[in-house]
Amino acid sequence: MDGFKMVKGMEQVQRRALSSIDQNITGALLRRSGSVNKREYRGKDDVCNKKSALEERPDGIETVGLNVLQDTKNQIQFTVNPGSLDDIEIADVEESEDDNDVTVPIFVKQTEAVIDKTEGMDIEMEAPITDIDCSDSNHPLAVVEYVDDIHAYYKKTEVSSCVSPNYMERQFDINEKMRAILIDWLIEVHYKFELMEETLFLTVNLIDRFLERCTVIRKKLQLVGMAAMLLACKYEEVSVPIVEDFVLISDKAYTRKDVLDMEKLMVNTLQFNMSVPTPYVFMRRFLKAAHSEKKLDFLSFFLVELCMVEYETLKFHPSLLAAAAIYTAQCSLWQIRTWTKTSEWHTKYTEEQLLECSKLMVTYHQKAGSGKLKGVHRKYSSYKFGYAAKTEPALFLLDL
C-alpha cells in the first residue's frame, strides 16, 4: 500500500509539472505573438501584384478578378488567442482608428468602389461575329473552303448585272408601268409552273438588260418576258417547260416561231452572258448570316420580289437589295431595329446604308394588297409561303 501511495503521488507531481510546462509554453507563445512584425501595407498595387483588381474580359465587361481576390485572401494572417475571440489580429487589413468601426478587407472595398463607379451605367453586350459555315464543314456542296471567295467575286462583279436606272427614257413605246405589269404577271406564271427561285430572278435580270440595249414596242413586250423566262429555265431548271406552254399562257397571242426568234435575238444581244449575280445568290448567304428561319425567309423574299416589280429599285445593287430585304423583314417580325455584327460583316453594309432602300420596301409592303398589281401579294398570302404578306410592315422605320 505504501508503494501504491508513493506511485500515485508521483503521478500527481508529474501532472502538476506538465501543467506548469503547458502554461509556460502557452504564455511564451502568447508573448511572442505580440511581438510578431506585421507586414507593412503598401497599398492596392502591392496586393494586386502590378495588376488592377479588375480584369477586362474580351467582351468589354469589367469583372472582379477571382485570382486577385484569392491572392488577397491568402495574404490575410490570423493570430488567435485560444482563450478569447477578441484577440484575433488580421494582417494586411486597414485598421480603423475608431474602435467602433467595422474592419473591412481591402478587396471588399475595391469591389464596392467598382460597383459605385459603374452604378447607373448601361452596359451593352454585343455578340461577336460568328462562324456561319462551321456546321457545314462536312457538307461537300457547301464548299466551305471557297464560299468566301465565291461571294467576294459575286460582290466584285455584281455591277455587270446592273442596268441604268433611267434606261426607260430611251424607250419610246413602253414605260415603267408596263414593265411592272409584265413582271407581276411573270411572277404568277413562275408560281404556276412551280419553277425554282433562281429562275425568277434571272428572268427579270434578262428583261432589264435586254430592254436597256433594244427598243421594243408594247405589243412585243410580253413576248420579251416569255423569251426571258424560257432562257432562264434552260439555264437554271432541270425540267424545262416546252415552248408550247408559253404560247398557251399568252392565250396564243404569239406563235412558236415568234418565241424562238425572240429567244435568238435576246441571247445574241446579251452575248450569251447568263452567269450574273442576282439578288438571289446574296439572299441565301445573307439569310444564313442572319441565322434565319422560315418566317424570315418568306418575308425577305416577299419584300425583294416586291422590289423587282418596281422600276425605281434598279438604282440599288443586288447585294444591297438582298441585305435591305432581310433587315426590313427582321424589323417587321420583331418591330425593333435589328442588324447584327455577323450580318454586317457578311453583307458589307451597315444599318445606315440600308435605310433608304428599307424605307422603300416598307412603303411597298404597306400598299401591296391594295394596288392593282397583286401578284406578289397573292403568292405570299398562301399557306405555302407562311402567309408572309399578312405580316405587319415596319412602319417605325419611316420615321427615322
Image (spheres, grey):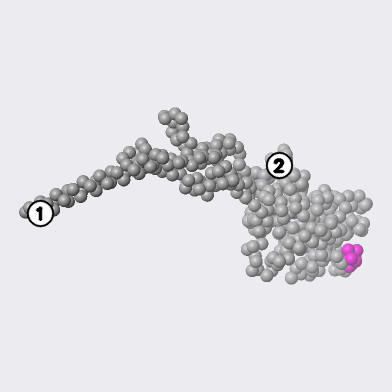
Residue 337 location (% of width, % of height): 67, 44
Farthest residue toward the left? 1
- Residue at image location 91% in from the left, 50% down from the top: 169
Q: Is residue 269 magenta?
A: yes
The quadrant holding residue 142 is: bottom right
Instruction: Give the residue number, with chain letter if any, for mark 2.
Output: 397
- Residue at image location 7% in from the left, 53% down from the top: 2
| Residue 239 higher or lower than 119, as above or below | below
Residue 146 location (% of width, % of height): 73, 66
Tell whether 236 sits left or right of 104.
Answer: right
Instruction: Give the residue number, with chain letter if any, for mark 1.
Output: 4
Q: Which secondary structure, mark 2?
A: helix
Name the foreground residue: 9 vs 375: 9
Looking at the image, how many numbered discs can be counted on the residues?
A: 2
Residue 32 location (% of width, % of height): 38, 42
Name the foreground residue: 282 vs 246: 282
Q: Mark 2 belongs to which amino acid?
A: Leu
Q: Which residues are magenta?
A: 264-271
Alpha carbon of mark 2 to alpha carbon of mark 1: how far? 107 Å
- Residue at image location 89% in from the left, 66% down from the top: 271
Tell whether 232 sits left or right of 265.
Answer: left
Residue 298 location (% of width, % of height): 67, 55
Alpha-carbon neighbours of circle 1 within 10 Å: few (<14), some, or many (≥20)?
A: few
| Disc nearest the viewer among 2 and 1 | 1
Predominant SS along the magenta part? helix
2 or 1: tag closer to the N-terminus: 1
Q: Mark 1 belongs to which amino acid?
A: Phe
Q: What quarter of the picture does the N terminus occupy?
A: bottom left
Name the foreground residue: 185 vs 60: 60
Q: Is residue 142 magenta?
A: no
